[in-house]
Image (tube, helix red, strand yellow):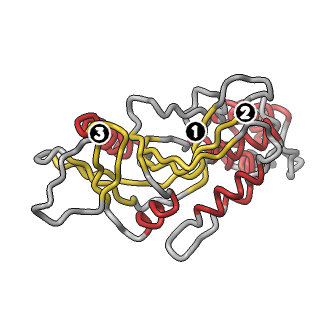
Amino acid sequence: MVEVPAPHAPSLTTNARARLSKWMDALLDLTQRNPLVSFRRDGRRVLPLDVESIAALEDGLASGAEYRLVGEHAESRPERKRSPTLAATLTQEALYGRAVELDRDARKAADEGGSWNLYVALGVLAWKETANSPKLIESPILLVPVSLAINRTTREATLSRHDDETIANPALIELMRQEFAVSLDSLRELPEDEAGVDVPLVMATVREAVARQPDWTVMEDAFVARFTFDKLLMWKDLREHGDKLLTQGIAGRIADPSAARRHRRTRPRR
């Protein structure tokens, strides 16, 4: 069960603290069911990219570049001006089909939930649960929000930067802290360079943090996929501000109805 920090306010009751802990447990998913923890690069709704430099890709996206996604063995069309290209390790037909699905699902999720969840994952940490474990688990490191523009006439897709923030994987940061005492807290505020995020510094920071872990490695790979971490951000807010939240207003009464009733009985009448 998630350890809840000690209260700052003495009025936080035992019942309210137990309810807060239960809420936090429900929000925090650091299991391998979460693709932010265990990412399957061979998933059906993943666009694997073939890039020489993930830093150059991030710089280009941050500068407003629009990349035409090109599959393996795609025909070139030199007769008209083209956008810069970005190679994917799929056939052109498979690439187009996955791009259509990703775009449709991301827009539907944004319409229904109000948050964007389509990202280019830059960099992957491959890690083991134990030193003797035969299995390497892969977690994305940087998440750059992107949009896909679909041209149904030419059956092509174009990738560009979305206006949300680039962030380090919050589930990875929390997993490393809780399970391995590895601190990636410096990545909560990402370092910047002249174009955008300082990607080489981010990768070097992760490599240094996990250097003592046998067989762990950072791979500079890139993928387009959907990631959702709204619940993790809610968990972070509860961890940092839960005590204050539960000593006032409706949230406090929900967390400990008996305390609210006692308060009403002892409140002086006017």
Query: Taking 104 as reference, is 266 left or right?
Result: right
**In the rendered image of this protein, does residue 62 appear above or below residue 127?**
below
- Residue 126: image x %, image y %? 65, 38
Query: Taking 202 as reference, is 15 left or right?
Result: right
User: Residue at point 74% right, 36% down?
Assistant: 215
Mark 1 vs mark 3, foreground winner is 3
Which callout, 1 or 3, points at the residue further toward the start of the chain? 1
Query: Which disc, if any, is residue 257?
Result: 2
**In the rendered image of this protein, does residue 242 appear above or below residue 164?**
above
Q: Amino acid at mark 3?
A: Leu
User: Residue at point 56% right, 50% down?
Assistant: 220
User: Residue at point 52% right, 69% down?
Assistant: 196
Q: Write down the residue under mark 1.
A: 36
User: Residue at point 70% right, 22% down?
Assistant: 134
Q: Write down the residue under mark 3.
A: 95
- Residue 187: image x %, image y %? 68, 58
Label 1: which secondary element: loop
Q: Amino acid at mark 1?
A: Leu
- Who is closer to the viewer here, 243 or 51? 51
The residue at the far bottom in this view is 194
Distance between the alpha carbons at the discs numbered 1 and 3: 22 Å
Instruction: Report crowding for label 2: few under 14, some 14 to 19, many 20 or more residues within 10 A (C-alpha).
Output: some
Residue 137 is drawn in which quadrant? Answer: top right
**In the rendered image of this protein, does residue 69 appear above or below residue 231?**
below
Mark 2 vs mark 1, foreground winner is 1
Query: Taking 44 as reference, is 59 left or right?
Result: right
Residue 28 is drawn in which quadrant? Answer: top right
